[in-house]
Image (cartoon, rainbow, N blue to C red):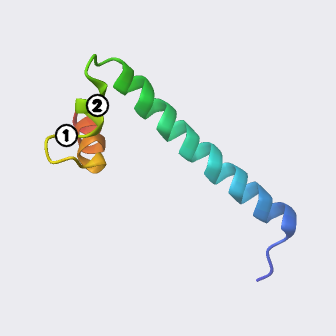
Amino acid sequence: MQIKQSEKIFIWVFMGLFTLALFLVYFINANKYKNRKKYFYTSDGFFVNGIKRLLES
C-alpha cells in the first residue's frame, strides 16, 4: 500500500502534536509542585518513575 506524501506529513504532524500535548500536561502538573527536580528525578534518578507518579496522582 502506497502512502501519499501529504498523508505522511499529516501523520508526522499528528504525532508531533500528540507528543507536545503529553509533555505540556506533564510540565503543567510538575509546576504544581515546589520541588520540581524531586518530581522529575525520583530517589533512584529515573525519569520513568516521575511519569509513573504522575499517572498515580
Counting labels gives 2
Label 2 sits on residue? 37
Look at 86% across and 61% down and name the residue there.
6
Q: Amino acid at mark 2?
A: Lys
Say if mark 2 contacts mark 1, CB within 8 Å.
Answer: no
- Local crowd size for mark 2, using a 10 Å CA cut-off: few (<14), some (14–19), many (≥20): few
* Callout 1 crowding tier (Cα within 10 Å): few <14, some 14–19, many ≥20: some
Q: Residue at x 19, y 40 (%)?
A: 42
Q: Amino acid at mark 1?
A: Thr
**Mark sitting earlier along the chain (2/1):** 2
Quadrant housing the N terminus: bottom right
Q: Position of residue 47 (x, y in %)?
A: 30, 47
**Looking at the picture, how far across and down is residue 49, in whole percent?**
23, 46
- Measure the C-alpha gap from mark 2 to mark 1: 8 Å
Dot 1: element: loop
Q: Which residue is mark 1?
A: 42
Residue 14 pos. (x, y %): 67, 50
User: Which residue appears at 25% of the width and 44% of the height?
Assistant: 52
Q: Nearer the viewer, residue 6 or 47?
A: 47
Above/below status of 28 relative to 55: above
Q: Where is residue 51, by image quadrant? A: top left
Residue visible at 28% across and 19% down in the picture: 33
Residue nearest the viewer, comparing 35 with 7? 35
